[in-house]
Amino acid sequence: MFFTPRTQALPATVPFVGPEALERRLGRPFRARLGANESVFGPSPRVLAAMAEAASGSWAYGDPEQHGLREAIAAQLGLTGAHVTVGEGIDGLFGLLAQLTLDPGDTVVTSLGAYPTFNYHVSGHGGRLDFVPYRDDREDLEALAARAREIRPKLVYVANPDNPTGSWRTADEIRAFAEAVPPETLVVLDEAYSDLAPAGALPPANWLRPNLLRFRTFSKAHGMAGVRVAYVFGEPEAVRQFDKVRNHFGVSRMAQAGALAALADEAYLAEIVARIARARDILSGIARDAGLVPLPSATNFVAIDCGRDGAFARRVLEGVLAEGVFIRMPGIAPLDRLIRVTVGRDEELNLFADALDRALRAARG
Amino acid sequence: MFFTPRTQALPATVPFVGPEALERRLGRPFRARLGANESVFGPSPRVLAAMAEAASGSWAYGDPEQHGLREAIAAQLGLTGAHVTVGEGIDGLFGLLAQLTLDPGDTVVTSLGAYPTFNYHVSGHGGRLDFVPYRDDREDLEALAARAREIRPKLVYVANPDNPTGSWRTADEIRAFAEAVPPETLVVLDEAYSDLAPAGALPPANWLRPNLLRFRTFSKAHGMAGVRVAYVFGEPEAVRQFDKVRNHFGVSRMAQAGALAALADEAYLAEIVARIARARDILSGIARDAGLVPLPSATNFVAIDCGRDGAFARRVLEGVLAEGVFIRMPGIAPLDRLIRVTVGRDEELNLFADALDRALRAARG
């Protein structure tokens, strides 16, 4: 058989079912799309203009060295182009990372209930996952580091700010965590929500270590999830490994042009960050008005504690979906008390408030 | 160390240096870009319109099931959606294929001098390459099948039409080849240039076998190289393995919308195929006028035999590049007698003719 035993044993399940698949099942489109932590505010008009201009040049492959974009990212970080590589979303970069680091049976430590697509790529490359529970709805950095010292995994994963809880840690806590991880373990620091992090939560960009890679994306605050462009930065010796295996022409011309324009439009980013913060407050108020507890969030979503067990939260989720509002929830206890709602414009938040109200009444019976 | 020994041993070289990198080295832009087998004629205006419309929706992830595009491709092939999956170019799909099929040390058979990015992904996943020489500037199907029967590799690679020679085989020859390959070896049939294949060269789309996967792309005749969208089709049991490891959100919204529009615009495709055929004749004439021998081509490029050794062809290539015309050549003997020139518009072909004339005079000394 040409497929490896590892491939044959992999499950057919995927980390996320798309809202389009749910719509096909439900037989109608959602009225609000608040489940995938996309930015309903969209990308900057300058990004759209840059992509439109690049589109007509799309008969040509994009620059495989991603020169202009790499240099622009590096300049913004205060680093050099050798510290950065660009990929097809953080998900795509996680696949490459697993390929670069894992032999079958190698161990990887993450939090139980953390980002599932990271786990998906680890499993897809034959890695074995080892889980540390969340603590008080945050990643337990001390326990993660202790587990890393105990079993010496290839990788240890932390997201700051965190998905699916929306929580964050301080830069000092992140640094202390990385210092407590043994040098033969690579710290995978997922900073997808970095643009939305409060002051003091992000270590400075020039904080690098030989066993650290930091991942950022244009999918969240920059509103470019459907474009597929993200980057990893770290010490050049680690970053250059990606060049040995990546799909060199994988980042499209439009993605490179759009990301360059997004980086340059700092005023738009600041405006969106403010709109997200405002919408997050409204969304938290909706949860409180419904008698639920919104968790503090440093992201573009709010995790809402439904206050009972996973079965109850699942009933609430199903009720909200049935009302035509797409949201998601973590699948694993104790986080499965939560539903996770992306911020939206006022009209979308109103649709969610109404849907939540009906769903809660039905779920409470 | 967190990077595997395999990773540490991989070379830093890449299959193709982009023209942008050459331009940065030369300090000026090329006057004609005829080296990467892109379509200078560009995508259909309907593709550009569809991508422009999709761009404003790019705040949302693309459908991870690629439902509409998969179904449309399947309908055109006379197959079902389960026979097809879409990826970030054939290169991206080759990376997934290597991940799915190769354990470190597994063997893969290909032709010496065939598509290097396939080899790159095989090596990146720890595969060991075994080479069969070209014969009369075509892939030697009989020798490839014999070698597969002898060493029982995981994969055997054939391109039809072929890159870098431009040659093609008949559907009957391809079928006989596949039947001669042992059932435990997967036939990787690269049909990137299928839209340009002469009548009788392509087996019908419903010709499938359990140990066969066929790869096609929107990068060549459809003029969408910079968009990154391609597909693989075959028996559902083999195709569904890709869903276990692929980057589900990896094909952008614009790519899905653009590819759908490209499929629908059959008149444009027919027009481009005719323009490519005409340009190929002109290009072959330029080679003959210069005293060189153009190989017959079923692609959007012409391989030109410079008639001496690899060092001579390399001098010709360097001379053409120095004149501001980007072309490429195969790196391995005996194919390194050839330079490979993508078709262009008349003005680009004229630039090439002048550049070739000067380069030949200098190379002949």
Image (cartoon, coloured by chain):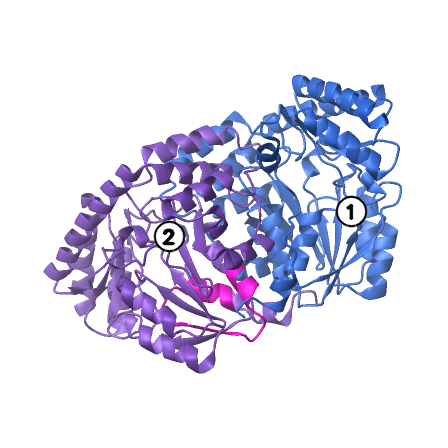
Chain colours: A blue, B purple
Q: Is residue A24 left or right of residue A36?
A: left
Q: Are marks 2 and 1 on the same chain?
A: no
From this viewpoint, is residue B132 visible?
no
User: How far from the left and from the top, in percent, is residue B199?
Assistant: 23, 55
Q: Is residue A269 left or right of residue B363?
A: right
Identify the residue shown where x is 61% and y is 27%: A30
Asked if the residue at tag 1 contacts the one at tag 2, i.e. Cβ–Cβ closer than 8 Å, the answer is no
| Circle 1: residue type | Gly
| Circle 2: residue type | Pro
Crowd tier of the residue under label 2, counting other residues whose Cα lies within 10 Å: few below 14, some 14–19, many 20 or above: many
Q: Indicate the quadrant containing the C terminus of chain A: top left, top right, bottom left or bottom right.
A: top right
Q: Is residue A11 magenta?
A: no
The magenta stretch is B95-122
Q: Which mark is residue A113?
A: 1
User: How far from the left and from the top, in percent, is residue B258?
Assistant: 41, 37
Crowd tier of the residue under label 1, counting other residues whose Cα lies within 10 Å: few below 14, some 14–19, many 20 or above: many
Location of mark 2 (residue): B19
Residue nearest the observer in this picture, B98 or B68: B68
Distance between mark 2 and mark 1 Cα atoms: 44 Å
